[in-house]
Image (tube, grey):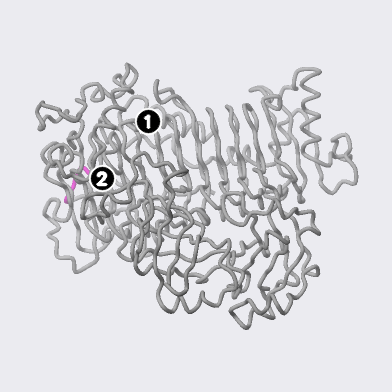
Amino acid sequence: MYIKRILSAALATIITGTTLVSCSQPNLENLLPFSEEEKVLNSYTSVIEGSALTLYVDAKAETSGDGSENAPFKTIQDAQTKIRELKAGEELPAGGITVLVRDGEYKLTESLLFTGDDSGTAESPITYVSESEFGAVLTGGVILSASDFEPISAEEKAKLVDDTAKEKVVKVDLTKYGIDPATIETIGSNAMELFINGERASLSRYPNTDFLRTKDVIFVGDVHEAFTDINFDCRGDAYYVEGYDPAIHNRGGIFTLADDVVARISKWSSYDNIYAPGYFKWSWSSSTPLIGNINIEESSVTLAHSVTYGVSKGAPFYFLNVYDELDMAGEFFIDKESGYLYVYKTEEFDTAEIMISSLPANVLNASNISNMIFKGFALCATRAGGLNVSGSDFIIDNCKIYNVRTYGITASGTNITVQNNEVCNVGTYGISVSGGNQVELIPSGNLIYNNYIHDYAVIQRTYQSAIEVFGCAATVSHNEIANAPHQAIGWSGPNHIIEYNEIYNVCFETADCGALYTGRNFLTYGSVIRYNYIHDIGLGDVHAHAIYWDDGLSGQTAYGNILENTSSYAILAGGGRDNVIENNIIINPGREPISYDQRTSDAMNKPDAWFTHNEEMSNALVANRNDAWIKAFPIYGQIIPWHEGYEGDLNDPLLSGNPANNSIKNNITYFFKGDTSDPNSTSPRYKIDKDVRKFSDVESNFVISDYLADFPHWHNDDYTMKANAKALELCPDFEPIPFDQIGRID
């Protein structure tokens, strides 16, 4: 099968370590699209026909039958029980068992739970499959009838700031639907949400779509971390608490508001249970603190508790969970005491499907399973996540997870395949997979393939990736990722492959971020980023990049990527050693195409340097160094750990803090016509610090000012390079990039 060919090819490359030593183009023979035969084997019909036994489930059945086609079970749990009975009585039939779940809504009041007792075997896998693609809907939502909504009282109308809203806002008693007010949450990871015709409604807020700004800061609050460099907005030591303990050191910041904002909020009837989501210090650190006090006379707001980095002047935020601000179609508010839901009616409200998420748990939890497949389901409307699965040799295939409060898929174990899924409109991250043994470099065999992940991190705005991999040797291949405020892919651990993905329109709300981001360790050697198309990253001139290796990240390879329209650098490396940046195409970056700084060596040579993590990273390197790592990465055994008081040669290329043994070459950058850079010069617009150049191989990086003439079909977003390209004249060693193979495969 294609997915196994991808995995074997990728693992063969990374285990030998060849990609770190040499960046020659890998063999693509095993990385071709599906054959027609493989497409047939991947179909729904083949799942049933290849099975020894098929059990049927139908939510519309009046009673639960025996699981036959004409007398289906009514619930998935009934089929699960039947399979356990079969396993207890005799061996599973060769060819396995398929549970065909017919189209319809399967309303859950608790999670679907699977354990090792539900597992199949290699010869007899267990498959749960929807009758048609996304036809079987596993939902934690409760449908509300529009006819149950009633007008609000005169007293309730009087509280609304917007006059039009007084006739548009309606309410319903959720206790009529069996919802206990004591279980209602509207903020946080287990909050209820409202969906109107499948669209997530907005909890009442002010302003509706934009941010306010803090005016003056009276008190920054207790902070978890303080910077002392003036370039990082020194706040002194007065508010920094060593050994921060939120139970003791939790004073919230105090700031003032602009006069027009004060005039608006002075009309509110109450300031209780109002929150202030925002970026109070750094644009990569979001938080949602409760408001402790609003003082209209002093135009001030006091947060009920501290936020990680304190409050700064001009910080963006907004007010959330404000009944008085129901002023936009689709906005809602829940009174936790009475259990009433208030909604500003949309035009189609009276005929719309109105759903509130009720299930306070994941749709599906499975632990220690093996040889199981979950295929074709839609999962939605839960106050938690989609699927949380652990074990080995299982597949999550062609499911759609949407409108959930937290994540789409979490999977841990070995030989896991997560493929062909759509994850969208989720509160936090899309897909997270972990496994393998990074200490002994035992590959996980995990594959995240051909998924479409978009409009994620809609609630928790930062450090929520579309895809994140942990452990050892996972492959992230042929995925499409779009539309998120922060990063797209994060990784930790050695020997991961990130390849053939298309990523766009991410990092649109944050700064100092990257579409592909990780940093600050020596434990991620051997990871390779190749043949990805990453474009339209960040907005305006914010500090957002396509690939960001932060704070001394080492042992990485970025090869053969196409990086277009980044608001800042295309590639940013913050110090680090043993990295390879070769054979990439960079188009229209907002700043220099590649920035490779020397923050790690500065930290060894300058007492006032802001980077302070060299010793911490060195200690981790020493603790991780063993025969497996030294065999895979010989340089790993030679690195000299730097520590405070080090008296050796600070110019030794093997010293851990020196940005040494990097290869930055054969990269081609294209700017718009009119760029004055000399196309025949080497590295005219590459920002490579002197210590990097001193210790590393930096050469043959070019800028071509004749905009995209090397790509005849660039107007159609086709970056296939022509045979007589200017780039190939300037850089004969440049290897054309297989652009036609990047992205999802139909």
> Is residue 42 among the parts visible in the rendering?
yes
Task: From the viewer's perspective, tell me whether residue 40 is left or right of residue 502.
Answer: right
Label located before the other in sequence (1 or 2): 1
Q: Residues within 10 Å of mark 2 (few under 14, many from 20)?
A: many
Q: Residue at x 34, y 24 (%)?
A: 16
Q: Amino acid at mark 1?
A: Pro
Q: How many marks?
A: 2
Residue pointed to by mark 2: 573
Query: Would you identify the image quadrant in which residue 234 lies?
Result: bottom left
| Residue at the far bottom in the pictured view | 163
Q: Is residue 540 left or right of residue 409?
A: left
Task: Look at the numbered disc 2 and give the secondary structure of its residue.
Answer: strand
Amino acid carrying mark 2 in the image: Ala
In this picture, which residue range is highlighted in magenta? 730-734
Name the spot of residue 731 as percent of width and height, x first: 18, 47
Would residue 334 be counted in the magenta stretch?
no
Residue 731 on the magenta span? yes
Q: Which quadrant of the structure image shows residue 655? A: top left
Please determine whether, in this image, residue 120 is positioned above or below residue 223: above
Instruction: List x then y, in percent, for residue 211.
Output: 44, 68
What's the mark number on residue 494?
A: 1
Left or right: where 333 falls relative to 582: right
Q: Main structural element of the magenta stretch: helix, strand or loop?
A: loop
Q: Compared to 300, does 435 lie above or below?
A: above
Which quarter of the image is occupied by the N terminus?
Answer: top right
Judged from the image, the secondary structure of the residue bearing numbered disc 1 is loop
Separation (CA) of disc 1 from disc 2: 18 Å
Could you tell me which residue is drawn at 87 percent across and 46 percent down?
A: 61
Q: Is residue 484 above or below residue 127?
A: below
